Amino acid sequence: MEAIGVLMMCPMNSYLEQELDKRFKLFRYWTQPKQREFLAQQAESIRAIVGNSNSGADADIIDSLPKLEIVSSFSVGLDRIDLLKCKEKGIRVTNTPDVLTEDVADLAIGLMLAVLRRICECDKYVRSGAWKLGDFKLTTKFSGKRVGIIGLGRIGLAIAERAEAFDCPINYYSRSKKANTNYTYYGSVVELASNSDILVVACALTPETTHIVNREVMDALGPKGVLINVGRGPHVDEAELVSALVEGRLGGAGLDVFEKEPEVPEQLFGLENVVLLPHVGSGTVETRKVMADLVLGNLEAHFSSKPLLTPVV
Ligand code: 8YV
């Protein structure tokens, strides 16, 4: 397969990059000073794209690669891929579902605990020597809080199962009520937020779910409510989130994702009720290795005419 051209869109994992280099003819898109010219030159040789949650395959790049056969994404999220265009052109698409579910769900619980129990602030308190001057103030209990989940897919369900171990009643919103669960369903996100102490975003990013957490939802969650986002930045209207937090209309937030990563609104930096993470939901050594193996496995299956391991299109 050494002659097959594979275009990697951005740096994402060194093991994956090494293995792609060994097994295929690897092109590193981010190292190309003149990307348009590069695409025109390699148009006949690139047959696969490897992207991730930052950089995938948009209509432009798909149109400039006439020999493209497969987009294998190093992510479960597909929002950076023009799926319709792929379908139209018969280009296969794969992602990395299941293998990252536990890590993302673990991190969502970590964010809930970190925000309510002020874990990062407590750490600062000890390191700065402030403890010597007096005890840290009291924080908020997590066990038993009502957790509302937007999107009860693989990740949403794993968050629900973990939160249940903390005796949290589970509410959820999804396009339709799930038949196989006893969790409480709400048909609107505003209703879900009104009936939850913690609201968690765990759905896929689509045009319908963009800004699914808007001002009305934040106001329904209220000054004691906490928003957790382990989905995508654009799920939340970030400007509204900043004003809700600054004005005290929302109790707190734990965010792993942002609208314009790696840019984060600086107004959040001074707020002690906010925990900010650099999109690390799936970022463990163990999980990233399995994700990389899935990307490689899908490419090898495709180019040896075997069934794809995790097909989307
Ligand atoms: C990664 C993700 O951050 O799977 C997703 O959708 O957002 C993450 O796992 C990313 O794709 C790693 O480069």
Image (tube, rainbow, N blue to C red):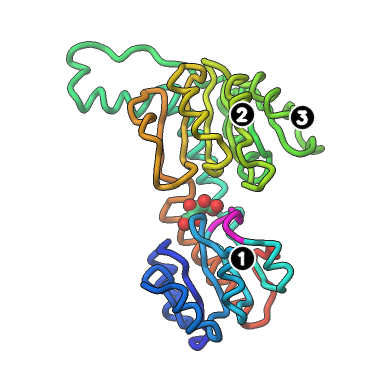
33 horizontally vs 279: left or right: left
Residue 185 x, y percent position in the rendering: 75, 29
Q: Which of the marked residues, 2 or 1, is nearer the chain's N terminus? A: 1
- Quadrant for residue 127, please give it: top left
Lower sequence index among marks 3 and 1: 1
Quadrant where the C terminus sits is bottom right
Q: Which residue is mark 1?
A: 59
Q: Is residue 305 above or below residue 80?
A: below
- Which element carries disc 3, helix, strand or loop? loop
Secondary structure under the numbered disc 1 in the rendered image: helix
Q: Going 53% across and 71% down the picture, which residue do you hit?
A: 296
Task: Give the camera-side residue of 42 and 191.
Answer: 42
Instruction: Tell me the kind of residue under disc 3.
Output: Gly
Picture mark count:
3
- Residue drawn at x 46%, y 23% is 245
Horizontal placement of 245 versus 171: left or right?
left
**Mark 1 lies within 8 Å of ligand 1 (Cβ measured):** no
Residue at (60%, 32%) from the top-left corner?
A: 213
- Nearer-the-camera pick, 235 or 124: 235
Task: Report which residue position mark 3 lands on.
Answer: 187
Position in image of residue 69 (x %, y %): 63, 77
